[in-house]
Image (cartoon, helix red, strand yellow):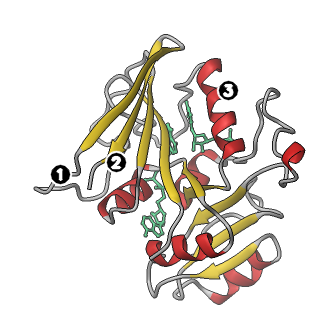
Amino acid sequence: MERPFVFINSAMSADGKISSFLRQQVRISGPEDMGRVGLLRAESDAVMVGVGTVLADDPGLRVKSPDHRGMRSKLGKPEDPLRVVVDSQGKTPPSAKVLGDGCILAVSRAAPEERLRLLGDRCEVVAFGEERVDLPELLSFLYKRGVRRLMVEGGATLNWSLVEGGLVDEISTYIGPIIIGGARAPTLVDGPGFSGGYPELELSAAEALDGGVLLRWRLLR
Ligand SMILES: NC(=O)C1=CN([C@@H]2O[C@H](COP(=O)(O)OP(=O)(O)OC[C@H]3O[C@@H](n4cnc5c(N)ncnc54)[C@H](O)[C@@H]3O)[C@@H](O)[C@H]2O)C=CC1
Ligand SMILES: Nc1nc(O)c(N)c(N[C@@H]2O[C@H](COP(=O)(O)O)[C@@H](O)[C@H]2O)n1
């Protein structure tokens, strides 16, 4: 199956949490890391999140950093990369900031008709899989739409499914100088977890940033 190069970018606390036990957004990154995120978005063909992240954070997923805004249009590309939401049941609120032109809502064939009608006015809605979004099918669809570089910005459940499916090439984690704590607070990769055959990583870069550290890992097959 042909698919884009897939990388996860995430910010986590020193204790490995990506948000609090309330599942509310926590600002972990400082200005330098946020600028780096802006550049990563500008350099990607698409940015993808799970619906849990949309419900928790209401992200826009556009290129916001002043240094990188306008970078894509100089290359004849749309101002922002494609925005993709993985949302099996079509639970994204129609008022979500991520919606609008350039947004693809990936649903399953089990998504209720009335949700699809409502959301179909706000973005392109495409079904993959029966009960749950079939991620290999979605990635193959994105590849056919010209997406070669896909940035995944969480959350914990989507990260798990992609890692478990062997669909991730690289992971960048910014580890910020903060402790969030909480056994129920989401971590970089949640889901049921592995009990063997743990995916192995190779460290490709490490850099001090914003009082924390940025790590880049390559997934080994
Ligand atoms: N610090 C950071 O860098 C980031 C933190 N977050 C935090 O993560 C939390 C959200 O994470 P989660 O609740 O885990 O939600 P999520 O964003 O991972 O979305 C998961 C949902 O996506 C849907 N889905 C459909 N098909 C799926 C598939 N094949 N595999 C997996 N999911 C599929 C399901 O409804 C599932 O519940 C929030 O608290 C948010 O603040 C999110 C992104 C980045
Ligand atoms: N890189 C990074 N650092 C943090 O501290 C964060 N909390 C996040 N969260 C991610 O950024 C999304 C917000 O996007 P917009 O700025 O609204 O476009 C949020 O949904 C998480 O995916 N990231």
CA–CA distance between discs 3 and 2? 24 Å
Q: Which mark is residue 198?
A: 1
Q: Which mark is residue 35?
A: 3
Marks 3, 2: nearer the viewer: 3
Of the image marks 3 and 2, the number of the one nearer the N terminus: 3
CA–CA distance between discs 1 and 3? 32 Å
At a point 56% along the width and 60% down the height, the residue shown is: 51
Q: Position of residue 27 (x, y in %)?
A: 56, 27
Amino acid type at image mark 3: Gly
Q: Position of residue 170 (x, y in %)?
A: 42, 46
Q: Would you say the beta carbon of the disc 3 residue lies within 8 angstroms of ligand 2?
A: no
Amino acid type at image mark 2: Val
Q: Quadrant of residue 40?
A: top right
Assign a secondary structure to mark 1: loop
22 lies left or right of 151: left
At a point 76% along the width and 53% down the height, the residue shown is: 97
At a point 46% along the width and 88% down the height, the residue shown is: 130
Residue 101, relative to residue 11: is it above or below?
Answer: below
Q: Residues within 10 Å of mark 1 (few under 14, many from 20)?
A: few
Q: Give the quadrant of the C terminus.
A: bottom left
Residue 62, relative to residue 1: is it above or below?
Answer: above
Of the image marks 2 and 1, the number of the one nearer the N terminus: 2
Whether residue 86 appears in this view of the structure is yes
Mark 2 sits on what residue? 189
Q: Residue furthest left?
A: 196
